[in-house]
Image (tube, helix red, strand yellow):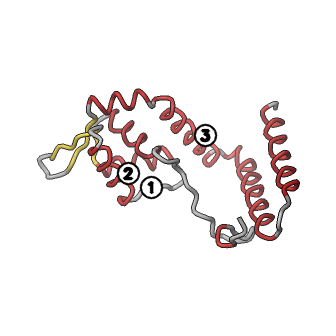
Amino acid sequence: MSNSEDFIDIESSKKPRKRLFEAGHMKLLVLHLIAQTPQFSYDIIKEIGNIVGGGYSPSTGTIYPTLNYLEEQQFIQSDITLDDRKQYRITDAGMVHLQQQIETVEKIMNRFDTRKQIQNNQQYLEIKRAMEHLKASLRLKIQHCELSVDQVQDIADKIDQAAVEISRL
């Protein structure tokens, strides 16, 4: 992992693009939203932005392929409204699939709820700052040093130890 393009300087205002969704999670979130009520693509984009928080808004280049995939799998169906817009609704197969994945959907929703709490709650600003500092320090260490196996293990052990101590607070 010594490719310097993957890392940022601690003083840099540019941040690397972070992957917000694991594979398949966007599809599940879109399906979950459509299960709540029939949705237009614009409404899905807005609602995902509200769920994720932090100024995030999925692009149409993300949403339309997701909707196409869900239609191909017959998890959703689109209807053309009187004003020639596509409105998506969940199918029976989509409801079955969603129920099979309900634990994953709950984890996705909880993750973004926690993310929004950290971003929007003033009392968590110091935690957010410390987390960003840790990430930047790790990036710089990896970027500028060839770490031995022992050093990597030592760093991982320290992070694990901090996690245990935090959970005990």
- Give the residue at the far front of this rendering: 149
* Residue that appears at 75% across and 67% down: 10
If the image is split into quadrants, where does the N terminus sit? bottom right
Which residue is under mark 2? 45
The one of 112 and 4 positioned closer to us in this rendering: 4
If the image is split into quadrants, where does the C terminus sit? top right
Q: Distance between the residues labelled 1 and 2?
A: 6 Å
Amino acid, disc 2? Ile
Counting from the top left corner in percent of width and height, residue 42 is at 32, 52
Q: Is residue 6 left or right of residue 23?
A: right
Counting from the top left corner in percent of width and height, residue 99 is at 40, 27
Question: In the rendered structure, are the residues bearing label 1 and label 2 in contact, judged by CB atoms less than 8 Å apart?
Answer: yes
Number of labels in the image equals 3
Determine the image quadrant of residue 7.
bottom right
Q: How far apart are marks 1 and 3 (CA)?
A: 18 Å
* Numbered mark located on residue 57 in the image: 1
Amino acid, disc 1? Ser
Q: Is residue 49 left or right of residue 123?
A: left
The one of 123 and 96 positioned closer to us in this rendering: 96
